[in-house]
Image: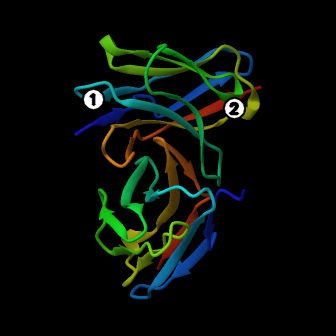
Amino acid sequence: NAGVTQTPKFRILKIGQSMTLQCTQDMNHNYMYWYRQDPGMGLKLIYYSVGAGITDKGEVPNGYNVSRSTTEDFPLRLELAAPSQTSVYFCASSLRGEQYFGPGTRLTVT
Amino acid sequence: AQSVTQPDIHITVSEGASLELRCNYSYGATPYLFWYVQSPGQGLQLLLKYFSGDTLVQGIKGFEAEFKRSQSSFNLRKPSVHWSDAAEYFCAVGITGTASKLTFGTGTRLQVTL
């Protein structure tokens, strides 16, 4: 099993550009999550999903969108990138309360 | 809403010394509790978890943690630290019936001196 995979690993965006961060898990977990990690702030939940077709907002959803068409995939969309979205983004999936994390995507918006 | 406090932002210990990282949570009932470790440039790896039962839980890499309900704490310990333990450590709390969402503390960065 590859676990949770994320692409790309690094990306630089200009203000106003859009992009999609990809997340895939091969563990057949129903629950999936997107977090952002900023220095000294821990991890903040952006969006989560309890199954295909079901998503909900987390603590910091503004500026982001998600979709969940399959159990495996949970992409995160940034429509109009802003410098405040410079961060490291982690995707995770969960089984019985225990979350498994991907390696992260480091995004810089300039 | 639940919250997690890790009062130590940065801790430095000598290799071979013992370690205790503090974690306090705020929640009315008994939550699920976790410790994760993050090496530089990596994702988070689960060290150990507490759901119920024995309040002293053992994890990977020789770590253990003790749940103390009276103190709302879940401190992480290791009797002898190795240089490879240098990393950032996150405590997290989860609650049943909330889609297994976790609330994370702000982390403690551990530096190990040789």
Are marks 2 and 1 in one subunit? yes
Asked whether, in this view, residue A24 is left or right of residue B102, the answer is right
Q: Tell me residue A25's x, y (percent).
A: 60, 62
N-terminal-most mark, 2 or 1: 1
Pointer 1 chain: B
Quarter of the rendering containing residue A47:
bottom left
Give the Cα separation between the discs numbered 2 and 1: 28 Å
Residue A45 lies, with reference to residue A11, above or below; the image says above
| Residue at the image point whose x is 52% and y is 60% from the top | A91
Residue B20 seen in the figure: no
Q: Are marks 2 and 1 in contact (CB under 8 Å)?
A: no
Density class for disc 1 (Cα within 10 Å; few <14, some 14-19, many ≥20) is some
Mark 2: few/some/many CA within 10 Å (<14, 14-19, 20+) = some
Looking at the image, residue B5 lies above or below residue A77: above
Task: Pinpoint residue B58: horizontal percent, then vertical percent.
Answer: 61, 20
Residue receiving disc 1? B26
**Horizontal and vertical percent position of residue A75:** 49, 73
Which residue position holds label 2? Answer: B85
Residue type at the position of mark 2: Asp
Secondary structure under badge 1? strand
- The chain under label 2 reads B
Of residues B112 and A68, the one nearer the viewer is: A68
Q: Is residue A76 above or below residue B54?
A: below
Q: Dividing the image into 4 quarters, which one contains the C terminus of chain B?
A: top right
Disc 2, SS: helix
